[in-house]
Each structure stands twice: as structure tokens, then as C-alpha cells.
Amino acid sequence: MYELVQAGERSYYIQSPAKIGIYRASSTEVYLIDSGSDKDAGRRCRKVLDEQGWTCRGILVTHSNADHVGGCAYLQKQYGCKVFSGGIEGAITAHPELEPSFLYGGYPFKELRHKFLMAQPCEVTPFTDGDFPKEVEILPLPGHFFDMVGFRLPDGTAFIADCLSSDAALAKYQISFLYDVAGYLATLEQVADMDAKLFVPSHADAVTDIAPLAQRNRDKVLAVADHICRICRPGKTPEELLRQLFIDYDLMMTHEQYVLIGSTVRSYTAWLKDSGRLTCAFEDNRLIWQAV
């Protein structure tokens, strides 16, 4: 873990739970793509850079989930570097308490206020800033989170963040975290047709052909949607639906899983309602999801 892997002529990544990408802008200066999950990940990243004689000129943030920006505050202090992000992702990176608040739907209780769901705050600079490396292409990849992006480097390596899960993760977790199901499916189509010499997902192996894995992720999303519709015959409350999904997919309920999967299931039901496959009504002061 935390080994340096060369991906292209000027691109690398640090093998970690959420890969940390590296763009070598010169013989001594690099830009990081994300920063790992916490201060310890930041320290390990700095050790790798020190071993190569590199200094960090900036951090390019794909999205604001804590496992991707948790090392930003530490690295920014160490290098005095800018942390580049945009849109809602930039706001959450600067104000990380927004992540557990969004997931829970209110002020998060203490079991949700920890580094897994809430990174340390850092100063954020927009992608439009003059110090952003203009030779790096920003790839919009919405769906998994609000304004998630990837980055295509000049050597043809594309870092595509969390826009798909590995086969092992699909089999183990079944329901991958999503914010916008329609946006996610559109992103999978975009990525399957994307041109790159190498694709580096954050949580799956780097590959030259991403289309097969993109299709398997699409198939899983559609299968989960179909299963939700089956459960909602007859109608179910949101809590009943969530409980049945945990039973059917053999998942273990924890505080973190309750908000992560719960938020994702709410996104599925919203998409299925907008698509005309579910309806919702109120019965005895309870919201009921009903398959059409």
C-alpha cells in the first residue's frame, strides 16, 4: 500500500484505498489528484514525494468525499500549495461538515462526525484560477456526487475518480453510493466512449479499456432499480424499503451505512418516481413508495 506506480510518461498514482494521482509538471514539481483519506494518508503521500525529490505545487480535487480530500489540509500546510476544486465540491471541501449534514439530512449526530465522512477544512481555489495547470483537461463526471470531475493529463492518462466500482466492490456491496442516478448513467456512457491511453479509477484497477467495467456498473444500477420496484409491490415506507434491501443484499447496518445507502436509495426512488416507475403517497402520515 502507498506504492508509487507509473501510469504514463508524466503520470503516476499512489496505490491507496482511494488512489492519489500525480502529474509531473517538471523534474521537481508535481500536482496531486486528490489527497487520500486523512492526515496519515497525507504523510504517506509526502514520504513518496520526498523519495522522488518532488514538491507538491497543487492538489486537483475530483470531488469532496472525505476519502478523497482528507489529506488536503495536512498537505496544504506542508507545501503551502493551492487546493483546486469547483462548484459544490469546492464548497464541501472548504466546509466539510456539509458532507455528513447532507447525507443525514440534518445536523449529524456525533457518530457521523468523524474523518470517514468529514475531512478537515482547507482553503480552496477555483479551477479558473491562473495557477491551475491549463494543460490538464477537466472531465465533468456527475452522478456519484454533485460536481465530480476527472482529469485527463497531457500524456493521455485519465483519472476518472469514483465514476465506477470494481467488480469486487459490486459483488460485495451491491449498492454503490450515488447522488444522481440519471446523471451517473449518462456519465457511464460518456466514460465508455472516452479516449485515453490509460484509465485510472480511484477504486478499481487501471485499464486501457474501461467500457466493459462501465457496462457492468450500468447493469448493476439497473438491477438495483428493478429490485427496488419489486420490493415496492405492495407499497413500502422508506425505512421498510431500506431494511428489505439490507436483508436481500446481505448488508450490515451501521451508522455510516445507514446514511450512505439511505441517501443512495432516496436518489434511486426519486429517479424511479421521475421516470414513472414509482409513485408516492401519504397514508396515515407515512410516505409510501408504490411500484406502478
Image: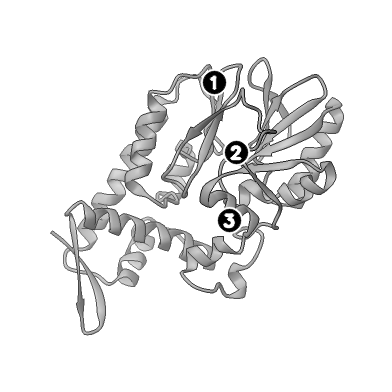
Indicate which disc, 3 or 2, sits on the residue closer to the N terminus.
3
Query: Where is residue 212 shown, x and y percent of the image?
Result: 38, 26
Q: Nearer the viewer, mark 1 or mark 2?
A: 2
- Looking at the rendered image, the disc whose residue lies closer to the viewer, 1 or 3, is 3
Q: Secondary structure at mark 3?
A: helix
Query: Which badge, 1 or 3, comes first in the chain's sequence?
Result: 3
**Along the line of sight, which residue is nearer the eye, 21 or 218?**
21
Q: Tell which of 44 and 90 is nearer to you.
A: 90
> Looking at this view, is 156 or 2 the one in front?
156
Mark 3 packing: few (<14 Cα in 10 Å), some, or many (20+)? Answer: many
Q: Which mark is residue 92?
A: 3
Q: What kind of residue is marked 1? A: Leu
Residue 92 lies in quadrant:
bottom right
Pointer 2 local density, CA inside 10 Å: few below 14, some 14–19, many at least 20: some
Give me the residue at 34% from left, 40% from top.
Answer: 185
Numbered mark located on residue 127 in the image: 2
For label 1, the residue is 198
Q: What residue is drawn where x is 48% and y is 43%?
A: 169
| Residue occupying image coordinates x 38% and y 42% | 184
Q: Quadrant of the C terminus?
A: bottom left
In the displayed structure image, the side of residue 261 where residue 28 appears, left or right? right
Visible in this render: residue 34?
A: yes
Q: Is residue 11 above or below residue 234?
A: above
- Under mark 3, the amino acid is Ile
Say what amino acid the circle numbered 2 marks.
Phe
Q: CA distance from mark 3 to mark 2?
A: 15 Å
Image x and y of residue 6, in percent: 68, 21
**Residue 285 versus residue 86 in the image, above or below:** below
How many numbered discs, if any? Answer: 3
